[in-house]
Image (tube, rainbow, N blue to C red):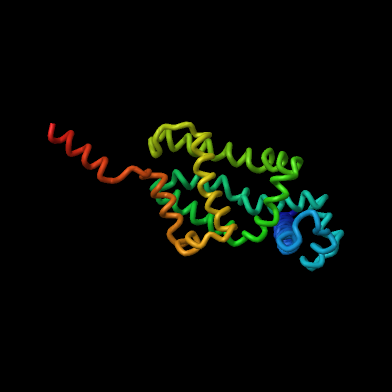
């Protein structure tokens, strides 16, 4: 094969991959619409295909079952493909600012899909098979990545020493809890949404002890 032919073949492969990605996103957008309005159990592949503007056969080219389609959406909500870069970014600059930026991105990304989350959450809570698979395929690997990132930051003294596994779950629980309250319609969170990332980062990095506590302790040491 000539260099020119090789270039054309690679270009065609790239184009096909781009088309496949776009079609997959198109299908997931249709599934988002149907799952958000009808829930997982009542939704049908036929309805999803109609909402996505594709044939039912096209959906099966990308997702073998409706459950696989559900997990495609859960991957989107989790931003699974972006997680490695996001965790690496935490160590790329000012740790506090990086945390704040990642929290903002997470709240905005999932916040836009609260109707979908509201529809899928009952399925995960009450369907043991789905919940087990979700923990195994999405939550578990994400936590493992996060533990490595937090452990690295602790080793570099960018964060204080603590149990990385527990720290990851406590931080994640805080963000997830905010999303749950938003989903329930908490008006105070809605009113202060713009400052939530900074407020969460401040609480994580400064704690809840009054500022005067540290300053008065320091003054006492200096006096001695």
Q: Residue furthest left?
A: 223
Residue 90 position within the rendered picture, expressed as x and y whole percent measured from the top left: 46, 46
Which residue is pictured at 54% across the width and 47% down the height? 85
Residue 61 position within the rendered picture, expressed as x and y whole percent measured from the top left: 82, 55
Position of the C terminus by quadrant:
top left
Which residue is pictured at 71% across the width and 61% down the height? 36
Residue 100 position within the rendered picture, expressed as x and y whole percent measured from the top left: 44, 52
- Number of dots carrying numbers: 0
Residue 130 or 7: which is nearer the viewer?
A: 130
Residue 78 is at least partly visible in this image:
yes
Which residue is pictured at 42% across the width and 45% down the height? 204
Q: Residue furthest right?
A: 57
Please state if 5 lies on the left or on the right of 56 as rendered.
left
Which residue is pictured at 71% across the width and 52% down the height? 72
Q: Is residue 186 above or below residue 175?
A: below
Please state if 75 lies on the left or on the right of 205 as rendered.
right
Residue 16 is at least partly visible in this image:
no
Please state if 131 lies on the left or on the right of 106 as rendered.
right
Residue 2 or 164: which is nearer the viewer?
A: 164
């Amino acid at each position: 094969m000539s260099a020119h032919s090789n270039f054309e073949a690679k270009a065609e492969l790239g184009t096909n991959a781009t088309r496949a990605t776009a079609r997959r996103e198109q299908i997931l957008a249709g599934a988002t619409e149907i799952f958000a309005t009808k829930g997982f159990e009542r939704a049908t592949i036929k309805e999803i295909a109609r909402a996505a503007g594709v044939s039912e056969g096209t959906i099966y080219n990308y997702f073998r079952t409706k459950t696989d389609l559900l997990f495609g959406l859960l991957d989107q909500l989790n931003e699974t493909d972006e997680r490695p870069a996001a965790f690496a970014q935490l160590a790329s600059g000012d740790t506090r600012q990086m945390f704040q930026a990642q929290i903002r991105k997470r709240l905005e990304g999932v916040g836009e899909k609260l109707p979908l989350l509201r529809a899928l959450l009952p399925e995960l809570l009450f369907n043991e098979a789905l919940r087990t698979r979700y923990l195994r395929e999405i939550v578990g690997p994400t936590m493992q990545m996060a533990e490595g990132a937090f452990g690295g930051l602790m080793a570099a003294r960018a964060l204080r020493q603590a149990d990385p596994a527990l720290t990851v779950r406590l931080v994640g629980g805080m963000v997830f809890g905010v999303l749950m309250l938003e989903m329930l319609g908490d008006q105070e969170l809605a009113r202060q949404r713009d400052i939530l990332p900074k407020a969460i980062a401040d609480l994580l990095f400064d704690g809840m002890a009054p500022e005067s506590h540290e300053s008065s302790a320091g003054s006492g040491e200096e006096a001695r």
